[in-house]
Structure formats: C-alpha cells, structure tokens
Amino acid sequence: MKNPKLLLPLLVLLAMASAHADPMDGLVVHGEGNVRYMGVIRVYDARLLAPANAVRADVLEAQRSFCLQLTYNVSLTADNFITAAEQILARQHSQAVLAEFRPLIDQLHGAYRDVAKGDRYRLCYDAATRSTSLILNNEVLVSIISPEFAVLYSGIWLHAEEPLDAGLRTRLLASLAERRG
C-alpha cells in the first residue's frame, strides 16, 4: 500500500466487518409454517432456526441463539406490527411485566418499518452477545441486550399458553426435542 496511514483504518474496518457475522450462521431450520388472515390470505411464512442440537428449552429460555424468520406475502405497515404485538403481549403478560419491559418494547417497535410482498423480517437472539436483533432484508434495525426480552418478545410466536397461533407454534417447534438425553 502506498499510503501507510490508510492501512490501520482499513484493518479496523475489516475486523469490524468480520466481527459482525450473520446471526443465522450455524443455525438450521427446526420448523416452519404460515399465518393466514381469516384462514384464507397468507400473510407471512415463518421459520424457526436454531443450532442443530438445540432443544425446546434452549430456545424458549434464550439459552442458545435462534432466529424467527418471517417472509411477507402482503404489504403491512409498521403500525400493523405494533398493534398486533401490543395485543398479543397484553394477552400474555401482566401490566407489571409489560411496564418493566416497556422501554425495550418501545425501542424495538420504534425500529419497525413498513413491508411489501417478499420482504423478510428476522428476530434473532444471539446467545454470545445476549442481544436480540430486528433485521429487515439483511439490515439490522435495532439490537437489544437482554435475554429476558428475547423470551418475552419471541413469545408472541412461541409462548406456551397464548401464542399468536398455537398451530404455528407447534410447527415452529416441530423438530426440537423436549430435553437432552
């Protein structure tokens, strides 16, 4: 390189790029399904990805990395996402629990954007960094450090008693064993 002053910034940029790996690296699909509006209009296709040897507790308690991937078949607004999430979270949790997590919920909701057919959201939890990222078409919109938040928010789809759709939850968790051994 002719200008040695440019070498250090270039090396720093390369190191940063390699440190920001795709959160889905090393994850495999464990289940998939779709959500339909009024049983007819397919709104999105969902996939749950986790390490090959993951068990249900790993995902449901944020002990290992996982991603929920949603590929949209219709256009939706950010307000559609927020309204639906707020309704489901209110059904699943007490007002006290929601108040405790309100700043993190609001941070994630503030990052939502409108989607069109073919767009893909991913909600990924990285166990190594203890962070949940909302990713739209490979662009990280927000990352929130809190395993407890990962459990709370992914519960929209994976909550044991009150998920968005019980059939979808079953299909997403289909190949995850109950426990090791």
Image (tube, rainbow, N blue to C red):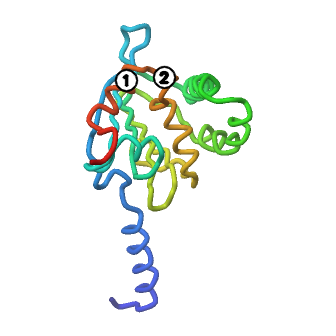
Which quadrant is the N terminus positioned in? bottom left
Residue 71 percent across, percent down from the top left = 36, 31
For the residues labelled 1 and 2, say whether their Cβ atoms are less than 8 Å apart: yes
Q: Amino acid at mark 1?
A: Leu
- Look at the picture and state if 81 lies above or below 15: above
Q: Residues within 10 Å of mark 1 (few under 14, many from 20)?
A: many
| Residue at 37% over, 37% down | 69
| Residue at 32% over, 48% down | 54
Along the horizontal axis of the image, is 159 left or right of 103? left
Residue 90 percent across, percent down from the top left = 64, 25
Frontmost residue, 22 versus 181: 181
Distance from disc 1 to disc 2, alpha carbons, whole Å, reads: 8 Å
Residue 143 percent across, percent down from the top left = 54, 52
- Look at the picture and state if 28 lies above or below 115: below
Q: Which residue is mark 1?
A: 168
Q: Which image quadrant is residue 93 in? A: top right
Q: Which image quadrant is residue 174 in? A: top left
Along the horizontal axis of the image, is 76 left or right of 89? left
Mark 2 secondary-structure assignment: loop
Frontmost residue, 127 versus 69: 127
Q: Residues within 10 Å of mark 2 (few under 14, many from 20)?
A: many
Mark 1 secondary-structure assignment: helix
Residue 156 percent across, percent down from the top left = 51, 30
- Look at the picture and state if 5 lies above or below 80: below
Q: Which residue is mark 2?
A: 164
Q: Residue furthest front?
A: 181
Along the horizontal axis of the image, is 172 left or right of 166? left
Q: Amino acid at mark 2?
A: Leu
| Residue at 45% over, 42% down | 123
